[in-house]
Image (cartoon, coloured by chain):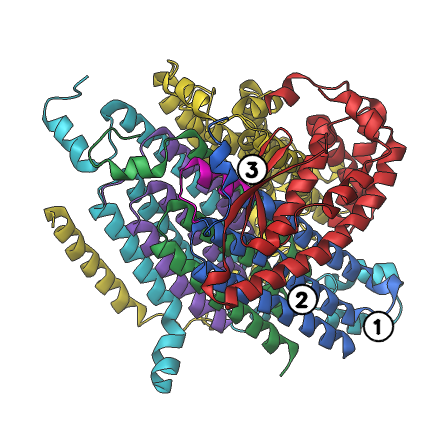
Amino acid sequence: MAEFFEQTLQPHFNFWIYVILMMIGLWALIAKNNLIKKLIGMSIFQTAIILFYVSLGVKEDATIPILDPYGQAEHAAADAEGAETEGEKKRDSYIGKKSPDPDTMANPLPHVLMLTAIVVGVATLGVALSITQMIFKEFGSLEEDEILEIVKGGGVDD
Amino acid sequence: MIFAFDIIILVFLVIAAIISLSVKDLLSASMIFGIYGFLICLLWAEMGAVDVAFTEAAVGAGISAVLMVATVFNTKRKSSD
Amino acid sequence: MTFDHFSIGVGLALFVFMLPAMWRMSVGPTALDRIVAVNVIGTKTAVLLVVIGVVFHRVEMFVDFALAYALLNFTGSLAAARFLHKTKSSSEIFEEEGGAES
Amino acid sequence: MIITIISAILILLGVVFFFGAALGIVRFPDFYSRTHAAGKGDTLSSFLVILGFAVYQLKDFHSFSHDWPILLVILKLLAVSLFIFMTSPVSTHALMDAGWEDKVKPEIGEGKPNHLNDDSEKF
Amino acid sequence: MRLSSIFAIIAVVITGGILLYGVSDFPSFGDPKSPANAAVPGSESVSQYFITKSYKDTKVPNLVTSVLADYRGYDTMFETVVIFAAGMAIFAILGSVGGESQPRVQEEESSFVDGDHSRIIVGTTCRLLVPVIQVFALYVIGHGHYSPGGGFQGGVILAASFIIIALSSDLDAALRRLSEVNYLRLACVGILIYAGFGVLCQVLESNFLDYGVLQPILLTDGPEMARSHSMLGVEIGVAFTVTAIMFAIYANLSSRGTLRDGL
Amino acid sequence: MQNRDTKPSPARPAHQIFVFGLLFVTWTILSGFFDPFHLTLGVISCGLVTIISADLLFEYRDTPILFRFRQAGRLIAYLFWLLWQVVLANYHILKLAMGSKDRVQPQFVRCKTSLKSDFEKYLLANSITLTPGTVTTKIMGDTFYIHAIDDVSAAGLEGEMERRIAHIFSTARKSSTSGES
């Protein structure tokens, strides 16, 4: 059990859940009858993909990708030199004599790609919802099979 | 990355997704989809993606649930499945 | 045991206390019960963000979006309350099967 | 050390109140009582937990001229709980009112008054 | 069970099976040496470059902001254009067809129980909170360099403040503060600010969105600070567009494009 | 809600400056940078917010600003008292949640108030919502309809809270009531 946990579950758990969420979203997109349920499925699908990207950029024991303005290590280094005034030390401590170690900081690139995707996702969700409203106005229903029947039966009744 | 939080949030995420897809009341479904947004914001924060988490916090708490509720208000609340 | 472990334990406790809300969310007899559960989880989220910040030793970064959560959390319940004010009651919608909807 | 102990006590108190709220959500009989547990248990307990973590920030505080950013962080943490205190009663009230408008049946204790029902014809 | 549901389950299981099979070959979660995080032997990793060099190049401690607005500025500009286009699509879909007034809303007005509670409790809280939310949103926009935040987040929060006004009283109260003409203008101005920074760099005989050459105009000490300040300007442009479009989406969706008597 | 918007009070420059000052304090706490560049940003942002929504923060703009400070001091003292009441409330709910189900006896009670202005009523309603087992459900004129979870909570409604709130605004009452309808 412990071995299974360490060998299989821990290294790939995020990726498993991303596949499961993707399956849930895809199933909702195909099988659900209601249009708003389909849109919820679409959003779940979208977050699954974002989850995949962000999981790729995670590093173990890494900190967030913002340089620390009041970092302890840099403070210690600046104290050792002792040449700077208090104010300068605070503002410039992250300028650092050395560049940060890449292994101790999360990968910023997936975050950048996904940050815009979320806002764009909301905008596209808005477009989809407006189309839904128009479909309701045209057919008086949000159920897929009823809409299909109306379309097959020769267009709109009213 | 905090591994204990990671597993719990991911499990909750799947539960919230399934609940929000199985509820027949579309108002409840859109509010539960809000929960999904809360949990996913926690997930980003815990994985160290602060900017993504901030975006998700603003979008999930302020905008997306309200947009869905507005659409349900203008269409129909009851769903067949 | 350091304070970090203690914080992680507090966070786990908060997640465990989310479970009743999740349960209420799935079985809740009315839509209102579900919305109340949503509200409960929303408040816990703001606290959990602070907990995560403490574990990361970077509270000054995480407190920003805990603030955003605290400020925007009630938007959803406000919208739902207005929705229920302006439409017919849920019992009417869900009991007349095949009747006039919306 | 003493700061850590104080903050731990505050946080544990908050967790206990969270537990009460969670219990209330499961056990109370109808929607209105559950809203009580949800709305109230969460405000005070989140305040206590956040206050605990704010107190814990003080452990790095040695001199004002060097460590003043910590004070700002503490103020922001207190602002978080202040906003929770402002918004939580509003959503509680809005949901309670919406529940009444939505004709959710309240469960009234035996022999207890229901003045809202008596007066609602007058509205 | 409907036919489409069986088909869906088959399709989903096949897709999921293939993806799960692929997962076993992934690098393990949280590995600092995985190909996405570190260099493949024999080549240079772009993310390592961002982490080690971006502070020296731009003087911005938040690496995400510096990558978002500087190194990948072209990408972000067109993401903003996508948001703008989404707003225009909503005007096209809802505005052209839905022009007539809805009789249904008048019925609802009468069923609204006349009491003071909504005005007193919800109205007063929103009245007190909205200026705080707006200052917070502007803080988020302005401090994207030093803490998480930036144009997208601040814009969304600013739009949420207007949505809260609309929810606490009605849509008219929000439209009086940010009217239809004004949000359309604001959205265009946002894009123009962003593109303007790019064109300005071209005027100064450099590449599009190469902020370093703006140093003589912005009067900063060194091209790094010029890049930092230009990023702030670009973020403000993004924030304008996002605010306007997000509020426009809410206003149109809640009132079926009529901008009257919404949710 | 419509009443407030159709009847805007005259905007006075002194009040706008006061609002600007309050917002700028908020900005300083949020920002934490005190160099000229960020202070300029703060002035621009707070000015923008003052232009957009200065009328939201204070409803009765006829009250002199000096009164505001005195009221604010009393309000803060009241909030500390309220915090203690909230602790008692939570302890009560905790006992109720752990005890037997028979002790939960929900009821709707009504109670009349003598408070006049909107803000006083708002404060009273929110205080009731935050304290022992009671939630304000509706306000109709002077009558509060309150859902109480058991007898102890319903009994605790009368009296002290309302007196304290009336005390906060006692001096400014004359000038503030003149501004409202």
Instruction: Residue E145 in the image: state x and y as whole percent.
Output: 67, 50
Vertical relation: D62 (above or below) F86: below
**Is F30 left or right of A32, judged from the image as shown?**
right
C23 or A86, nearer to the observer: C23
| Label ID, residue E160 | 3
Instruction: Residue F54 in the image: state x and y as whole percent.
Output: 73, 29
For disc 2, the neighbor class at 10 Å (few under 14, some 14 to 19, many from 20) is some
Is the same chain shared between marks 2 and 3? no
Using the numbered discs, state the Cα–Cα distance from disc 1 to disc 2 in whole angstroms.
18 Å
Q: Mark 1 lies on which chain?
A: A
Range of magenta residues: D93-107
Q: Within the image, what quadrant is residue F17 found in? A: top right
Residue at 57 percent across and 32 percent down: it is E118
Give the drawing colour for chain F: red
Mark in front: 2 vs 3: 3
| Label ID, residue A99 | 2
Secondary structure beneath label 3: helix
| Residue type indicated by callout 3 | Ala
E128 or E94, nearer to the observer: E128
Q: The blue chain is which one?
A: D
Q: Which chain is yellow?
A: E
Give the drawing colour for chain C: green
| Residue type indicated by callout 1 | Asp
Q: The cyan chain is which one?
A: A
| Residue type indicated by callout 2 | Ser
The residue pinned by badge 1 equals A79
